[in-house]
Image (spheres, rainbow, N blue to C red):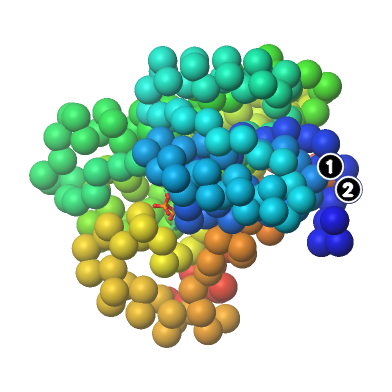
Amino acid sequence: MSNRRYPELAGKHALVTGAARGFGRAIAMRLADEGVTVVVNYRRSMSDAAATVEEIEQRGGKAIALRGDVGKEKSLDKLFTQIADELGHLDILVANAAFGVPGSLVEANEHHWQVTMSASAWSLISMTQRALPLMKNGWGRVVSITSDGGQKVIPGYGVVGPAKGALESITRGLAYELARKGVLVNGVLAGLADTKSARSIPGADQVIQHASRHTPKGRIVNGEDIARVVAFLCSDDAEMICGQFITVDGGRNIVG
Ligand SMILES: NC(=O)c1ccc[n+]([C@@H]2O[C@H](COP(=O)([O-])OP(=O)(O)OC[C@H]3O[C@@H](n4cnc5c(N)ncnc54)[C@H](OP(=O)(O)O)[C@@H]3O)[C@@H](O)[C@H]2O)c1
């Protein structure tokens, strides 16, 4: 395929969580364009996941859609059993899916905390544990997706901010533990993009307009911007990048 940048990725197998839409869909398409066979994971959006697979196949790539809730252990057991049965091995895990209860910390309850931390932070540990036995050739990549909310206050983000902070810490911890096993763990810190999850933040319209005006590159990011950097982090060019987050936000964070 003409738009391959990283020939070493051809023939690899990847799981991209939350790949029916948004960033996950773009990441799945990009990896498939590199010759990676992609598991398009979804939780509820079955028809969107099927459409992602169809588009990948139309472009000459390979993909299968598999259901799985990253916040539920039994669901992950089933998902990884299916991956083992259908693909035999897994080389790349892109922990893109996140689920959280937005709002205010003052009004958050333990249930909000538990579901958000399970799906958006613990899932990285629990999926990596399941992926490792399938990363068979001493080569693996784990990429997580975070936001500004792990380090800064995003009004209305509620318990999602602490979950992203935990996700970032877990990314570094796993990077340390797995570096000598040939499994490279890094992340992308994505700027605001106009996706369904961003639209759930209170006052999303104004937030998006404000971000567009104050982004040095003149526009907010989109899924393809994120997907290209995920592909780079999966490539051999990223070999000595370990436990890092690459910020992809058009320069938004350098402006006060
Ligand atoms: N959009 C932004 O501005 C922005 C900025 C920085 C970082 N991020 C991060 O980027 C990632 C993708 O966000 P997005 O904006 O692309 O979101 P999105 O368009 O709303 O898509 C989220 C995806 O996650 C899936 N998902 C949610 N909970 C899940 C669960 N428990 N198990 C499996 N899949 C689940 C959804 O699947 P179903 O529809 O099938 O349920 C959906 O496909 C997230 O980690 C988000 O925090 C986003």
Whole-percent x and y of residue 155? 25, 60
Determine the residue positioned at 47% across, 30% down. Answer: 67
Numbered circle sitting on residue 164: none
Whole-percent x and y of residue 214? 44, 82
Vertical placement of residue 30 versus 74, above or below: below
Quadrant location, the C terminus = bottom left
Task: Please state which of residues 83 and 183 is positioned toward the viewer in this rendering.
Answer: 83
Quadrant location, the N terminus = bottom right
Determine the residue positioned at 49% across, 73% down. Answer: 220
Disc 2 element:
helix
- In the figure, is residue 219 to the left or right of 58? left
Q: Residues within 10 Å of mark 1 (few under 14, many from 20)?
A: some
How far apart marks 2 and 1 lie (CA) works out to: 6 Å
Q: In this figure, what is the number of numbered marks?
A: 2
- In the figure, is residue 98 to the left or right of 14? left
Disc 1 element:
loop
Whole-percent x and y of residue 5? 84, 57
Q: Say whether residue 241 is visible.
A: no
Q: Which residue is mark 2?
A: 7
Q: Which residue is mark 1?
A: 10
Tell me the quarter of the picture where residue 248 sits. Answer: bottom right
Amino acid carrying label 1: it is Ala
Amino acid carrying label 2: it is Pro
Task: Please state which of residues 31 and 123 is positioned toward the viewer in this rendering.
Answer: 31
Vertical placement of residue 164 versus 229, above or below: above
Instruction: Note whether ligand 1 is within 8 Å of mark 2.
Output: no
Determine the residue positioned at 88% across, 48% down. Answer: 7
Can you name the residue that lies furthest to the left here? 107
Whole-percent x and y of residue 227? 63, 56
Instruction: Note whether ligand 1 is within 8 Å of mark 1.
Output: no
Task: Please state which of residues 63 and 103 is positioned toward the viewer in this rendering.
Answer: 63
Report if the CB atoms under discs 2 and 1 are less than 8 Å apart. yes
